[in-house]
Amino acid sequence: MSTPVSPSPRVEAVPPHADAAPGPAPAARPARDGIFRPLRVAGAIAQLAALGIVGPIVFTILVSLLSIGASLILVLGLGLVFLLAFVYALFALGWLETARVDGLYDFGLPARRPRRSAKPGFGGFLHTVWLQFIDPGMWRGVANSAIATVLGLIVLPLASVLVSGLVLAFSPLFEGGGAVRLAGTGIEIGAAWAIPGGLLATVVSAAALVGLGILHGVISRAIMVPSREAQLAEAARTSNVQRAGAVRAAEVERTRIERDLHDGVQPRLVSVGMTLGLAQQKVETDPAAAKELIAEAHTSTKAAITELRQLARGIHASVLDDRGLDAALSALAARSHVPVTLDVRLGARCSRTAEAAAYFCIAEALTNAAKHSRGSECRVLVREREGGILWARVEDNGIGGARVVPGGGLDGIANRVLAAGGQFRLDSPAGGPTTVEVSIPCAS
C-alpha cells in the first residue's frame, strides 16, 4: 500500500533493490521417485505431445520477432518495438514453462517475476528490459521448453506407431489376408505376422514413450531446479539482503525518532521550562499573570505527553500484541487525518514480526498520504494469501508522483518489508492514484 507523495521536496521512489526483490528461498528438491510415478509419466507424455504441436509455432513467433526487430532496428527505431515484444515473449514463455513443470512435478519452484531497475526515467526502462533479457531463470525456462518441444516432436510419431500397432494386432479380424502397413513407418507386414508385429510395435513404442516421459522429468529437474550449492548461495544472498534491509530500516527509524524528538517534543518541553521560569518570576509581583503562565505550561505539557504517546506508538503498538492486526489497524484508521476505508480479512494470526512489519508499513503509508497526497480518502486492504503470505495494499485518490528517496517514509517501508523477507511495490503515476503493496511471509 502506498501513499502518494506529492512532487514536493520529499517525494519517494522505488527501492534500490527492486530489480531483484528476494522471495522465499528455493524449496528443497523432492525425491527422484516423483519423476517415475506413473501418473506423472503419463502427464509428461501428454504434455510433450501438446508441445510437439504448439512448440514449433511458439518458437517460430519468437524467431520472427527477433529477426524483424533486428532488421528494422535502423528504420526509425521500429525494430525496438519488436525486440521489446521478443524479450517479454521470452519472459512469458519462461513463466509458463516454470508453471507447467512445477504443476506436473511439484518441484516447489517459485513463480517467475519480472525484473525491475531502480533507475528512473527512460534509462531505467532500458535497464529493466536488459535485466529481464539476462534473467537466468527465464532462460532456463526457455531452454527447457525448447528441449520439451524437441521431445514432443518425437512423441507424436511414436504415438502414431503405438496406435497403428494396436490396429495391426487386431487386423486379422477385419483384413482379408493381404499385407498391412504400419502407420508412420512405411513398413508393410503380412497377415501371418500381423499379430506379433503389431504387439512388438505396440510394446516398443510404449516403452519409448515412457522413456521419453521419464527423460523429460530428469531433464526438467536438472535445468529448472537449482543445485544444492545454488540453493545455499541463494539463501545466503537472501539473508544478506534481508540483513541489509533490517539495518537500513533501523537507521531510517532511528533518524525519524531523533527528528520527531528534536523538532517536536524537545522544543515544546523547552517552552514549558521557559514558561514556568517566567511564572516563577511573577508569582509574587503579578499572581494573575503567573497563573496564566502556569496554565499555559500545563497545556503545553499535556500536548508534549500526547506527542510522546504518538511517538511511542510509532515505536511499538501494544494493541498489536494484545488484540492483533485487525484491531491495531482499526485504531490506526480512527486516528488518520484522511478518511480511511478498512477491509481486513484474516484467519489465524501471523508471526509478530510479520504483523508488526505490515502495521508499520500501513501506518507510514497513511502518514505519507496525509502529508503529501492531497487526497480525500484512503483504502486499506489486508488479506492472507495462499502460501502463508500476509498481503496488504494502501491506495489513495491523491495527486500521485510518489517516489522512494533514501531516508524517506517509503524507503523505511521498503527496507522493513525487505528485512521481513517480503516484497514491496509502489505504483504512483502522475495524477494518481498512489498504491503501495506489501507481501510478507506470515512465518517471517
Image: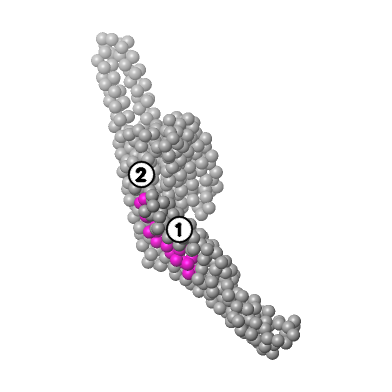
Vertical relation: 262 (above or below) 78: above
Q: Are marks 1 and 2 in contact (CB under 8 Å)?
A: no
Name the N-terminal-most of marks 1 and 2.
1
Q: Residue at x 43, y 40 (%)?
A: 428
Label 1 element class: helix
428 sits left or right of 347 in the view: left
Q: Which residues are magenta?
A: 126-148
Q: What secondary structure prevails in the magenta region?
A: helix
> Is residue 147 covered in magenta?
yes
Instruction: In this rendered view, identify the residue nearer to me: 397 or 443.
Output: 397
**x then y, percent, for residue 363:** 43, 38
The mark found on residue 121 in the picture is 2
Q: Residue at x 31, y 16 (%)?
A: 293
The amino acid beneath tag 1 is Leu
Where residue 436 sits, quadrant-wise, is top left
Q: CA distance from mark 1 to mark 2?
A: 26 Å
Which corner quadrant holds the N terminus?
Answer: top left
